[in-house]
Image: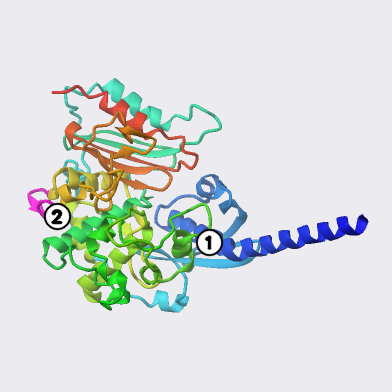
Amino acid sequence: MKKIIFRSLFVILLVALAWAIHYAWVSFPIISGFDAKQVCTCIFVSNRTKESIDSGEMSQYPFSMAKYEINMQDSSVTASVFGLAKRKAIYRKGIGCTLINDFTEAQVRSQTFSIPSPPPVNTDSISFPYGDKINDTIPSNINTAKLNAAVDAAFTESIARKKQRTRAVIVVYDGKLVAEKYAPGFTKDTKMYGWSMAKSVGSALMGTLVEQRKLDIKKPAPVPEWSNINDPRHAITIEDLLHQMSGLDFLEDYSKASDITNMLYKKGDMAAFTADHSLAHQPGTVFNYSSGNSNVLSRIIRQTVGEKDYAAYPFTALFYKVGMYNTLIEPDASGTYVNSSYVNATAKDYARFGLLYYYDGIWNGERILPEGWVKQTVTSPSSNKLKNYGYQFWLNGIDKNHPAQHEFPDVPADMFYCDGYAYQGIFIIPSKKLVVVRLGLTLDKSFDTNAFLKSIINAIKPI
């Protein structure tokens, strides 16, 4: 009997050891990669303090398992888990932080990114949204007390164990900034992660190329890995990628080692990693939300613009045209901007981006996006049963648990929005003349987006 017990315990120990080794091998590089990249951006792009990062992003398991070191001399952050799976992210002025993967640090540092300076405009003397000057006049149909209460509630931690951790809220009504608030440690000048809101920015960049007639989104995507007409992936169009209907077998699961976590934290060329995936479905038939699709689109933008102009393109074609002077996109180690996840901007710049779509792609009289692009953006294809996604924007589609109502039942059906990890959001509600920005670090699903938007809408009387 003792021998049976001993053997059983030995087997259990071996299984546990094997699991631990497998977990460390698969997950430690992702954890240390996340920590190195996240801390690097928080320190060098957002100008956050170490204390703020440790009590925020790095306080959550499993990221709290890692230890990191900040090197101010070479502008880098190195992280590891129990001294294993060491990863390094480096900061470069104008383009933020890049995690070293597949390429050597010397190769990455040798890359040239020529970022143009913003135009010499005194934004403090120009009214928002074209500048930063805020007019004191609030439209008479806005109940200021109700609006301020709605914004304040977004920052209130009413339940001790819940941590919605709102960092910034901007409310724009009919083009006028009517509410703005920041959490301690964050200001109007703080560039903050947008996470998957970057997908919408990438869609806008794609739109600028369509406006220039350099791309036809109805044609097969110009992806080298799919160039053979006998390859079933050759049928994937740019529009399929925009709709998240490429059919690629890509798993977007942040709770474990999956395609998305491996791509962001283990791969130096994220578009190539995604393009190598096989099909799980016929292109254009099944909605499968994938950050990989967004990075394939980003590489298409790079190929179309050309190496000489690519680094500057987001700034010259989009950011500086709409006054987004405090926005950047970070590249992967291959030099391609990570349009799935790595946009950083101030809350006002995110609001300006939302206003570009509110104004149907026109900014200060200049058409930035093609005529009809915004309408196409907010039109879900018939094969998307929930009607909740357009061109890299989310729509107020059907609630999968309550098919008779919209996902946000107290928000107008015409609302469309950019959405990012930990409840980042730019909400465009044309029928209510609203653009609302909410930034934060909500990891426990405690932020009620529907209630938040409802309370803001209720503060505005119909005209």
User: Residues in magenta?
Assistant: 363-372
Between 421 and 248, the one nearer to me in the picture: 248
Q: Amino acid at mark 2?
A: Leu
- Location of residue 387 by image quarter: top left
| Residue 394 place in picture, x, y as percent | 29, 46
Query: Taking 97 as reference, is 185 above or below it?
Result: above
Q: Coloured how?
A: rainbow
Residue matched to label 1? 30
Alpha-carbon neighbours of circle 2 within 10 Å: few (<14), some, or many (≥20)?
many
Q: Residue furthest right?
A: 2
Q: Position of residue 150 (x, y in %)?
A: 34, 26
User: Is residue 84 located in the magenta-colored stretch of the structure?
Assistant: no
The residue depicted at 22 percent of the width and 74 percent of the height is 306
Q: Does the magenta portion include 371? A: yes
Answer above or below: position of 136 versus 41: above
Q: Secondary structure at mark 1?
A: helix
Which sits in the foreground, 283 or 418? 283
Q: Nearer the viewer, residue 293 or 201?
A: 293
Judge from the rendering whether residue 128 lies leftward or rightward of residue 163; answer left or right. left
* Residue name at image x 55 percent, y 30 percent: 160
Hey, which quadrant is residue 108 in on the image? bottom left
Secondary structure state at the residue bearing disc 2: loop
Q: What crowding class fits label 1: few (fewer than 14 Cα within 10 Å), some (14-19), or many (20 or more)?
A: many
